[in-house]
Image (cartoon, rainbow, N blue to C red):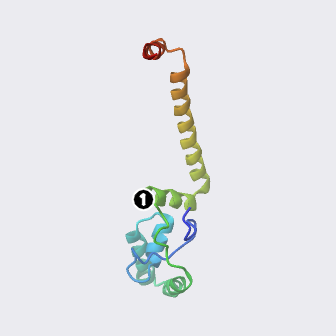
């Protein structure tokens, strides 16, 4: 885990943000493209006349912390943590499934090398 912050916490993403990084932070947190978040905020504010969104945006920009630069190691790491934030049970099931697959593959390798493989035994004997 990164030493600079929690991967399940909301952060402002000023690196990918246009103004204060709130929409980019929401996009990073949820895994939704930032363009759709920005369009949704603009549409709700201008078309639906939900002016409280501007106040909420400013409050979030003031209260939230900036995203640490080393929060994710890879893009795959970012996708995994977005999945954890949106659906913990599914992410846990995915991890279990990956471990089961690795365990099965290791068992197959072990079976191959420890079984009575005549050709392998002959090759080992010829090396002696």
Task: Check disc 1 and report its element: helix, strand or loop.
Answer: helix
Q: Quadrant of residue 42?
A: bottom left
| Residue 113, above or below 12 | above
Neighbour tally class for label 1: few under 14, some 14-19, many 20 plus, Cα within 10 Å: few
Which residue lies at the image location 49% right of the left edge and 74% below the top edge? 67
Residue 85: x and y in percent read 57, 62
Q: Measured from the top left, where is residue 54 in percent x and y? A: 48, 86
Residue at the outermost front position: 128
Viewer-proximal residue, 52 or 20?
20
Splitting the image into 4 quarters, where does residue 40 fall? bottom left
Horizontally, is 104 left or right of 123 in the view? Answer: right
Q: Which residue is mark 1?
A: 75
Name the foreground residue: 66 vs 35.
Answer: 66
Q: Is residue 10 above or below residue 82?
A: below
Note whether 89 is above or below 124 in the view shown. Answer: below
Which residue sits at x=57%, y=66%?
A: 8
Count the labels in the image: 1
Hey, which quadrant is residue 116 in on the image? top right
Q: Nearer the viewer, residue 95 or 29?
A: 95
Quarter of the figure with the N terminus: bottom right
Residue 51 in picture, x, y percent from top left: 49, 87
Could you tell whether 93 is left or right of 47 in the image?
right
Name the one closer to the observer, 26 or 128.
128
User: Residue 38: x and y, percent?
Assistant: 40, 75
**Residue 30 vertical position relative to residue 88 in the rendered view, above or below:** below
């Amino acid at each position: 885990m990164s030493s600079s912050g929690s991967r399940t916490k909301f952060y402002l993403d000023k690196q990918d943000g246009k103004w204060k990084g709130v929409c980019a932070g929401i996009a990073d947190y949820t895994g939704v493209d930032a363009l759709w978040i920005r369009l949704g905020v603009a549409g709700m504010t201008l078309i639906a006349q939900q002016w409280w969104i501007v106040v909420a945006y400013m409050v979030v920009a003031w209260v939230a912390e900036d995203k640490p630069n080393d929060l994710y190691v890879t893009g795959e790491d970012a996708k995994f943590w977005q999945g954890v934030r949106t659906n913990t049970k599914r992410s846990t099931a995915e991890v279990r499934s990956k471990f089961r697959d690795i365990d099965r593959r290791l068992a197959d390798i072990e079976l191959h090398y420890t079984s009575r493989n005549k050709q392998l035994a002959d090759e080992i004997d010829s090396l002696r």
